[in-house]
Amino acid sequence: MRLGTIALCVLASACATPAMSPANLAPDANFTAAPAYRLAAPVTIKASAAGNQTLRADTTWMRVGSIAHGDVFHTKDQIVIIDSFNVFEADIVVKDGKVVGYFIPVGSRFVVAQPVAINLAIKDPQ
């Protein structure tokens, strides 16, 4: 019986949903006039209880607003997901040159990630 309880706990933790907290997005007033940013090199993000997500190099990102944890960036060049027991489409949250988490627009939630450096440079207009 004890072994069955331990196995159930292990299985439940493997399917755990990452910790989410409420986050209110303050959208950028000039979103359409905001500069585009280019990701210079791939970045791998790890949130607790979720799989790794690699952001591809040479993708274009737009700052869409901010939350208490940092600036929120969105891309149309790839689908950014948090893959755990549930799968959520998300944007990235950047503070002081590091990805610090994900913003989930549906439900307005923030998921913390291990901070990782990111190089977003303003893209030259063409």
Image (cartoon, rainbow, N blue to C red):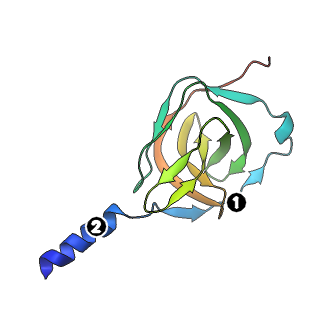
* Quadrant of the image occupied by residue 105: bottom right
Query: Within 10 angstroms of label 1, few (less than 14), some, or many (20 or more) residues?
Result: some
Q: Residue at x 19, y 73 (%)?
A: 6
The picture places residue 41, in percent across and down from the top left corner, at 52, 24
Q: Name the image quarter holding the N terminus.
A: bottom left
Q: Amino acid at mark 1?
A: Asn
Q: Is residue 61 left or right of residue 29?
A: left
Q: Residue at x 54, y 40 (%)?
A: 99
Q: Give the secondary structure at mark 2.
A: helix
In the picture shown, does residue 36 fall above or below 63? above
Q: Which mark is residue 11?
A: 2
The percent position of residue 86, horizontal first and vertical second, equals: 48, 62
Tell me the SS state at disc 1.
loop
Q: Residue at x 67, y 34 (%)?
A: 61
Vertical side of 86 occupied by 89: above or below: above
Q: Are marks 1 and 2 in contact (CB under 8 Å)?
A: no
How crowded is the residue under tag 2: few (<14 C-alpha within 10 Å), some, or many (20+)?
Answer: few
Q: Is residue 7 above or below residue 98?
A: below
Label 2 is placed on what type of residue?
Leu
The image quarter in which residue 40 lies: top right
Q: Is residue 120 left or right of residue 11?
A: right
Which of pointers 1 and 2 lies earlier in the amino acid sequence?
Answer: 2
Residue beneath the point at 67% across and 42% down: 74
Residue that mark 1 sits on: 24
Q: Position of residue 13 (x, y in %)?
A: 32, 65
- Disc 1 versus disc 2: distance between alpha carbons? 33 Å
Q: Please tell me whether mark 1 or mark 2 is closer to you in this view.
A: 2
Q: Quadrant of the C terminus?
A: top right
Q: Viewer-proximal residue, 45 or 116?
A: 45
Q: Is residue 106 above or below residue 103?
A: below
- Whole-percent x, y for residue 114 in the image: 44, 45
* Residue 62, quarter of picture: top right
